[in-house]
Amino acid sequence: MAPGTADRILQTAARLFLEQGYSATGVSTICREAGVNSGSLYHFFPSKDALLVGVLKWYEEHLDPLVMGPIEKAEPDPVERIFALLAWYRSNMVATECRLGCPIGNLALEVSDTHPEVRPHIDVNFVNWAARIEAWLHEAGDRLPADLDRRAMSKFVLTVMEGGLMQARASDELGPFDDSVAQLRAYVDGLLARGQSQHTTGATA
Amino acid sequence: MAPGTADRILQTAARLFLEQGYSATGVSTICREAGVNSGSLYHFFPSKDALLVGVLKWYEEHLDPLVMGPIEKAEPDPVERIFALLAWYRSNMVATECRLGCPIGNLALEVSDTHPEVRPHIDVNFVNWAARIEAWLHEAGDRLPADLDRRAMSKFVLTVMEGGLMQARASDELGPFDDSVAQLRAYVDGLLARGQSQHTTGATA
DNA sequence: GCAGAAATTGATCGTTCAATCAAATTTCTT
DNA sequence: AAGAAATTTGATTGAACGATCAATTTCTGC
């Protein structure tokens, strides 16, 4: 009837899973906050687990247009896009006073083991994310060392983001996140310097 | 009666929280697997939340003797101890086929927001951990650059560990973890080279 | 060995959980 | 407008949840 009932359920569930976690969120709470009866929810999603998969697919579809797209639009430099992404998450943490963190990361730790049929959908989100970062790193061309493993580096960027968010939430301070980003910056600066030297040397030879 | 009932409850709860998460673990399950009646559990712990705090205090007491101590004993080089710690976690992931991960990290993402009275106990674990790593970094002396922020670097090491574990669990493969550690290694190698050059220069001047 | 404290038993409390379903309503197709 | 399909309603299910407590047993100090 009302246009987008399934979508409203998905987005409400996504928000509640982020705020409270998956297990701690009751189906009845999702229904109440989405303004839907439980029968409606189970008409679109056969189980709570299926709803979780739906939420992860929703993220899969919306991560790029909602996060990566704006970043690429605002920051043309492929290397700086990495730090723009980290800054985007930082601003979220500022807005939420170090709460919530990353919806995919939270679910990754909560359900990867216990819901083997859900885990691949979490993985896809990470993989898509890393692929976009890897594209940036390739775009940087010879500004980065030729022998840099850009696939490994893309995973590393996600690692720094997720690990930094985790410690920020645990400490209720952005310090550990900023510390981690600063170290990543130092690492990248070193890579750029080495890329520069390689490039110069190669060009002059 | 039986010596160590409270301890048995603590360790059973710690294991189940690690395997299933906090919310997904029922008190009745903890009781059954610990061989204890619910009344006994509530004799020692006034609530499930209090039991969680007890588990975190248990980790706080046992992390050093169970993890950091053996690593320091096996690896004398302070810088290599960082990678020995990462290797220790890696071996755990191999043994569990990329499951479980870090008990503190899992709880950090699950309960930091929803249980504000628990969060500080998670933080203490991270802080103690980072302090130990920071001590290693100071022990490395002038092998590392003088201007390296060793406190920030210690947070960074934890970040790499936790972020790597997260992606390894999500992908059911050690690849992302190994990738992240490899990048950290490259960063540290760069730091050591810079420390060496500073040291040499300083000594010759 | 006795008294008091500590620990344990196990049934039970009310609540919330995920999930179901027949009936009613709305939307879509023609 | 009519009939079919899709959606929504809302009460209800049995199971599991965290927690309680009087009664019993075991341990401890004297």
Image (cartoon, coloured by chain):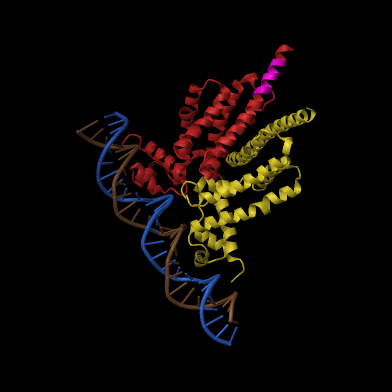
Chain colours: A red, B yellow, C blue, D brown
* Residue drawn at the location 47% of the way across and 35% of the way down: A92
Q: Is residue A166 above or below residue B36?
A: above
The image shows residue B48 at horizontal and vertical percentages of 49, 58
Residue lying at the far top of the rendered structure: A204
Q: Which residues are magenta?
A: A192-201
Q: Is residue A16 above or below residue C27?
A: below
B37 or A78: nearer the viewer: A78
Q: Is residue B84 left or right of residue B107?
A: right
Res. B192 image quadrant: top right
Res. D21 image quadrant: bottom left
Q: Is residue A138 left or right of residue A43?
A: right
The image shows residue A136 at horizontal and vertical percentages of 57, 24
| Res A65 seen here | yes
* Residue drawn at the location 47% of the way across and 41% of the way down: A100
The quadrant in which the C terminus of chain B is found is: top right
| Res A115 seen here | no
The image shows residue D29 at horizontal and vertical percentages of 59, 77
Residue lying at the far front of the rendered structure: B205
The image shows residue B193 at horizontal and vertical percentages of 74, 30
- Give yes or no for residue A196 being in the magenta stretch: yes
Res. D26 image quadrant: bottom right
* Residue drawn at the location 43% of the way across and 44% of the way down: A46
* Residue drawn at the location 57% of the way across and 28% of the way down: A133
The quadrant in which the N terminus of chain B is found is: bottom right
